[in-house]
Image (cartoon, rainbow, N blue to C red):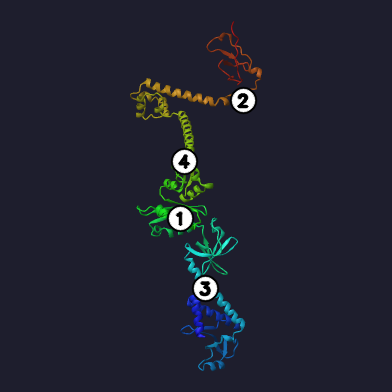
Amino acid sequence: MSSQMAEAIRQLTQDKGLSKDSVLQTIENMLKAAYKRTFGTNVNAVVQFNEDQTDVSIYSRKVIVDGVYDPVTEIELEEALQLSPDCEIGDEIDILVDPREFDRSAIQTGKQTAHQSFSEIQKDSLHAEYKDKIGEIIIGYYQRERNGNIYVDLGKVEGILPSKFQSPREVYHKNDRIKALITDIKKTSTGLQVVLSRTDPDFVRSIIELEVPEIYDKIVEVHKIVREPGYRTKIAVLSHREDVDPVGACVGLKGVRIQAVIRELEGEKIDILKYDPDPRIFIKNALSPAEVSAVVILDEEKKQALAVVPEAQFSLAIGKQGLNVRLANRLADWSIDVKTEDQCEELDSLIAESRRAADQLFSDIDEYEEITKISELPGLDKTIIDILSSSEIITIEQFLNAQEEGILNSIEGLTSEQIDSVVALVNSLAVEDEQEENFEQDSDAFENDIIEEDQSGSSEELQNEQIEPYEENEHSDEEEYECPECGGKITIDMTTCPNCGIGLSFEFEDEE
């Protein structure tokens, strides 16, 4: 018996990869489960292994009492004395239980418990082992396919390659060798399941690291990889040594290194390009294999750039269905707009025309800016400006206030003719402002006249009635007339009567 148990423990530790302690714990749990199935409880079950752990025994620990209430956990003193003559009431005694006395259902329960325990232990052990392998490459063999998902035999565990993680270029058959990246570990009812991927950019990273020793030695670094699985991959690399070309190291002599990666990806196109901290150079490189004439940064904060290419390179820069420029956007992390040189020339002419229009607009606005300072008066002698400035008269408003207070005549060096010249310029500006204001108020004034005439209550005939002049004032400089409504005195320059407010109009007959 002891030799059989020792052999069983050895096989479990070697074949299943289980630790000896976990095997012993499982045997203990199995015996306790069978004990509980037989006696209804296992709180008083005690499992003991011998010193070399080649044999095991199970005991029922009972309390010595005078009058047994629970025969599973208690024993009479007389019966206990037969087993140990030194025992007393209240002591505990361990009674050996023969597992062969367990009924069939108890034995089956023990087996199920052992099987579940071994299964959980194995899952935990494998999970701990493969958890550290996430992000690494593993090789397995095609086992079966279900709902587009491919199940891969990895030896100890089963791998699953979901359809979304499969390249559209690849077709698999039974027993085909599959190399993939471990992306996740899952526990299932049937065991541990390893999730695989062949579309992850890190899969390409791991493949190229295996092919390029300079990457392993950290002489060359992979800055970033972007990928459209099955179509194209862009890899940006840089070198930490000036004498090592990072692109050449990845491509290899006659392209032998990069060809190995391409074969693993079933012919997927791969662009190896040099990373540069200058976004202009990096964007230019990212659009390879297209040749870029220039890169213009449109908005550095928003990371927007314009790439200018020759007409013959435009379709290559964009790529089929925009694939090349999309990958370049993701690789450089910039929003790249690609235009031809002809398109840029048209754009430049439009921008120049817009700028000219804007400059003209602002220059027109400047012409009509209000003049507030003496120095801004057109044609004014600089000597006058300096004399007024020395007296702290800078603005036109300060000049007018000084004139009103009679201060100007007391300023030393300032003649009356000079004062008159400044006044004339100020008045000319006032006239221009008044004319502009009159133009703006023409429509309002016209409407107000109509309203005033309506409010006067006069009829259309009265408004158009001829007004006879006083004979004695006829042809004089200030002819006076009589208002036809109220009889008040009016002059020819009036449009409304100052007394009653009636609208006035004058008509004269030609003298023969």
Q: Amino acid at mark 1?
A: Gln
Q: Position of residue 470 (x, y in %)?
A: 58, 10
N-term mark: 1 or 4? 1
Q: Return the residue at label 2.
A: 451
Which residue is disc 3 drawn over? 121
Verify CB contact (< 8 Å) between mark 4 and mark 3: no
Q: Which residue is mark 4?
A: 310
Quadrant in which the C terminus appears: top right
The percent coordinates of residue 195 (x first, y second) are: 53, 63
Where 28 falls versus 244 (above or below)? below
Of the two numbered discs 1 and 2 in the rendering, the one whose residue sits closer to the viewer: 1
Q: Farthest left residue?
A: 413
**Which mark is nearer the camera, 4 or 3?**
4
Residue furthest top in the image: 512
> In the image, what residue occupies the spot 54% across and 10% down?
476
Q: Amino acid at mark 2?
A: Ile
* Distance CA(mark 3)–CA(mark 2): 103 Å
For marks 1 and 4, give the one nearer the viewer. Answer: 1
Disc 4 to disc 3, C-alpha distance: 65 Å
Type of amino acid under label 4: Pro
Q: Is residue 314 left or right of residue 278?
A: right
Disc 4 residue crowd, few under 14, some 14–19, many 20+, Cα 10 Å: some
Q: Earlier in the sequence, mark 2 or mark 4?
A: 4
Residue 259 is tagged as: 1
Q: Residues within 10 Å of mark 1 (few under 14, many from 20)?
A: some
- The residue drawn where x is 55% and y is 92% is 80
Q: Secondary structure at mark 2?
A: helix
The answer to whether any part of residue 40 appears in the image is no
Residue 190 locus on image (x, y percent):
57, 70
